[in-house]
Amino acid sequence: MKYLHTMIRVSDPDATMRFFELLGLREVKRMESEAGRFTLIYLAAPGDEDAQVELTHNWDPEEYGGGRNFGHIAYRVDDIYATCQRLMDAGVTINRPPRDGHMAFVRTPDGISIELLQDGRLPPREPWASMPNSGSW
């Protein structure tokens, strides 16, 4: 068995693409279906193209509540503090800051939780060590 991708439904593919590009993912494939009225966009981290996120955009407006869009996706990052800073500088809310130097949670524009995990732990660093949570993750 081999992991292929995680699919999340998105209401604004451009906003979601900008979010994932901030994380470092790049588009590896796109497919549009006129008959099915949807677009599929596959993203992956450079050098890890086998682990993909599939963004599904249904062209007809639809609200994704009650778990219809997904739970969370996890990525290992090289420097959790630098990653969170880059996201925060771009206006992304850090829902669970990396106070422990190991784990943080952010959300996509559609409210999907993204878990960021440091390989190992970095020593606590301000302002992260004393930053409160900004909401549920």
Image (cartoon, rainbow, N blue to C red):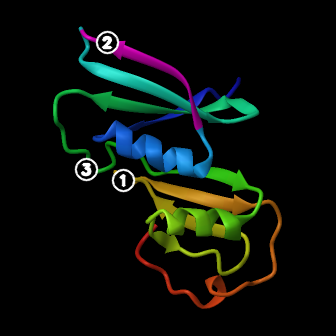
Task: Name the amino acid, label 3.
Answer: Gly
Question: Secondary structure under badge 1?
Answer: loop
Q: Residue at x 76, y 33 (%)?
A: 47
Q: Name the residue under label 1.
A: 109
Most foreground residue, 22 or 58 = 22
Q: Which residue is drawn at 31% across and 42% down?
A: 68
Q: Name the residue under label 3.
A: 65
Q: Which of marks 3 and 1 is nearer the N terminus?
A: 3
Question: Secondary structure under badge 2?
Answer: strand
Q: Residue at x 45, y 46 (%)?
A: 18
* Spot occupied by residue 92 in the image (x, y as percentages of width and height): 45, 64
Q: Magenta span has 105?
A: no
Q: Name the residue under label 2.
A: 33
Q: Distance between the residues labelled 3 and 1?
A: 14 Å
Q: Residue furthest front?
A: 89
- Rate crowding at label 3 as few (under 14), some (14 to 19) or many (20 or more) other CA atoms within 10 Å: few
Q: Quadrant of the image for the N terminus? A: top right
Task: Name the amino acid, label 2.
Answer: Ser
The residues colored magenta run 26-34
